[in-house]
């Protein structure tokens, strides 16, 4: 719809809303990167704002860090049409007059006002009862409007108002047995056969913690163990990231496919990062990229959250769960304000909120998190190694913690598997395996697991240069660090 076709009450502050947001970017151009989801002509609709926003975007792309009179005149020097439009709107004095009274600290509020007004326009166009509720909606922010209509839709269409109700556990097992037989209690797959058998996958409606020490492979192992097997099975995976960038994730996902699915091992991950490919490597990387796009593959969607908070996480999960994303990975779960006195109490509340959301949206939610630095020399990992935030495991259905094996363990540990008989069935006879002192191994602890055992640990060979993991066997490490 043309802007003038909307009710006047909806657009009466439109010039002010767009002007405040766009002129904030003229005052501090580096914010253009942070708010690059705003599309000119799609989210910015008034003629003057489209004009100024276009200039700001183009100048910033060309490398201008300050949008002052000199830089704008330089940019417009050979652009007669733009220059005429700029002068017709009052030249640089118009920008100067507005930016002089804008407080850049209000940029997030200005942004939310723009998002909120766009939501109301689109909801109105879609037939939602915007005008009937306009007074109430004008007092809300964008997230509150989203929740308001989400509730209205559920109430009207799905009748999903939660009510406390009882069920009889003395009957109803005929259908439950059929569900069990069809494998409905098996969750999203994990790449490690041993860990997958232990966990029975990542379950819908549940919250799992995936924990290691800082810089010890939480994200890369999550790509190998959780993302790769699921997209291969056609499951869509949403990654919410607050520490690493889009390029850093691409530099994990693409090599992971190259090594694990294309089977190309002539160069390691570090060499790929250096560029200057020969024809063979370039072709193999293209093959890896094409593997991701093949029919039947699930999609990986990444949301980089520069402004990390639980309410935004919940909003994104709601949005993508409705689009068929059943597995969500948050990298990394941490307190919103780590230096706050209440940080760890808020951390526990955040975990509780995530757990409830996973149940409500019927998704499998995995959060990577850091083990306490004091446990870096510990042989045995437990809930005590989560630090002050260990209350978060109360809401987790599964706790997976891992560390690298120490050299002395490589020399004395002998992981075991079980032998198979002539029919290929496992028998209760252990087969011991030697470890190579020159290789890297990870030992996985499952300190909490609602679907299986927790006692023994799993040793995997891990090659971070080629993003590969393979099971070696089971071990028994006691709580005092000794090995049985």
Image (cartoon, rainbow, N blue to C red):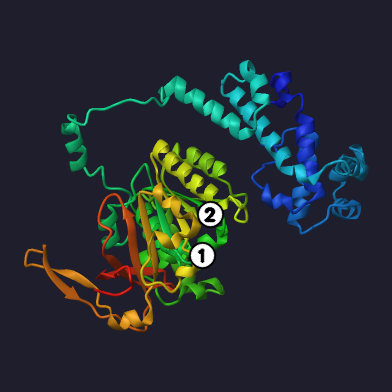
Counting from the top left corner in percent of width and height, residue 442 is at: 36, 71
Left or right side of 189 for 268: right
Query: Do we see residue 223 in this rendering?
Result: no
Of residues 69 and 357, which is closer to you in this image?
A: 357
Instruction: Give the foreground label among 1 and 2.
Output: 2
Q: For numbered disc 2, what is the local secondary structure? A: loop
Counting from the top left corner in percent of width and height, residue 198 is at: 26, 57
N-terminal-most mark, 1 or 2? 1
Q: Quadrant of the N terminus?
A: top right
Residue 96 lies, with reference to residue 214, above or below; the image says above
Left or right side of 81 for 237: left
Residue 118 lies, with reference to residue 435, above or below; the image says above
Gap in angstroms between the C-alphas marked 1 and 2: 24 Å
Counting from the top left corner in percent of width and height, residue 60 is at: 76, 54
Asked if the residue under mark 2 is in contact with the one under mark 1, i.e. CB atoms within 8 Å, the reply is no
Quadrant for residue 386, please give it: bottom left
Q: Quadrant of the C terminus?
A: bottom left
Which residue in the protein does label 2 denote? 334
Q: For numbered disc 1, what is the local secondary structure? A: helix
Residue placed at 39% from the left, 25% from the top?
163
Residue 479 lies, with reference to residue 87, above or below; the image says below
Of residues 84 and 252, which is closer to you in this image?
A: 252
Which residue in the protein does label 1 denote? 251
Counting from the top left corner in percent of width and height, residue 5 is at: 70, 21
Residue placed at 68% from the left, 37% from the top?
112
Quadrant for residue 460, please give it: bottom left
Left or right side of 60 for 301: left
Residue placed at 74% from the left, 43% from the top?
107
């Amino acid at each position: 719809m043309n802007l003038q076709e909307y009710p006047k009450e909806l657009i009466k502050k439109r010039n002010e809303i767009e002007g405040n947001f766009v002129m904030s970017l003229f005052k501090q151009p580096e914010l253009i990167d942070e708010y690059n989801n705003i599309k000119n002509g799609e989210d910015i609709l008034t003629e003057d704002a489209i004009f100024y926003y276009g200039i700001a975007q183009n100048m910033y792309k060309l490398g201008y860090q300050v949008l002052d009179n000199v830089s704008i005149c330089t940019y417009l020097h050979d652009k007669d049409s733009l220059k005429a439009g700029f002068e017709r709107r009052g030249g640089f004095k118009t920008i100067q007059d507005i930016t002089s009274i804008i407080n850049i600290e209000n940029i997030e509020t200005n942004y939310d006002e723009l998002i909120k007004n766009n939501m109301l326009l689109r909801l109105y166009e879609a037939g939602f009862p915007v005008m009937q509720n306009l007074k109430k909606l004008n007092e809300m922010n964008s997230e509150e409007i989203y929740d308001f209509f989400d509730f209205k839709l559920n109430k009207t269409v799905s009748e999903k108002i939660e009510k406390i109700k009882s069920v009889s556990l003395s009957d109803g097992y005929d259908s439950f047995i059929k569900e069990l037989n069809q494998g409905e209690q098996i969750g999203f797959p994990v790449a490690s056969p041993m860990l997958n058998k232990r966990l029975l996958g990542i379950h819908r409606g549940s919250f799992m913690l995936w924990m290691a020490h800082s810089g010890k492979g939480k994200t890369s192992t999550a790509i190998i163990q959780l993302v790769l097997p699921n997209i291969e099975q056609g499951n869509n995976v949403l990654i919410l990231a607050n520490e690493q960038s889009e390029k850093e994730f691409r530099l994990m996902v693409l090599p992971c496919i190259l090594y694990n699915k294309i089977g190309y091992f002539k160069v390691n991950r570090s060499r790929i990062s250096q560029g200057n490919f020969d024809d063979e490597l370039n072709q193999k990387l293209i093959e890896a990229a094409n593997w991701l796009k093949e029919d039947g593959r699930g999609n990986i969607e990444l949301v980089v959250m520069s402004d990390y908070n639980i309410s935004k996480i919940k909003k994104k999960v709601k949005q993508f769960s409705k689009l068929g994303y059943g597995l969500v990975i948050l990298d990394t779960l941490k307190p919103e304000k780590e230096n706050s006195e209440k940080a760890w109490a808020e951390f526990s509340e955040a975990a509780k909120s995530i757990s409830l959301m996973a149940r409500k949206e019927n998704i499998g939610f995995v959060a990577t998190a850091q083990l306490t630095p004091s446990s870096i020399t510990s042989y045995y990992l437990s809930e005590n190694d989560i630090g002050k935030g260990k209350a978060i495991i109360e809401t987790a259905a599964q706790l997976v913690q891992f560390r690298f094996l120490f050299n002395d363990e490589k020399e004395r540990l002998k992981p075991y598997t079980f032998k198979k008989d002539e029919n290929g069935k496992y028998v209760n006879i252990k087969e011991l395996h030697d470890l190579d002192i020159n290789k890297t191994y990870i030992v996985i602890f499952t300190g909490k697991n609602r679907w299986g055992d927790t006692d023994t640990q799993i040793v995997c060979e891990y090659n971070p240069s080629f993003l590969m993991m393979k099971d070696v066997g089971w071990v028994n490490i006691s709580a005092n660090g000794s090995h049985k």
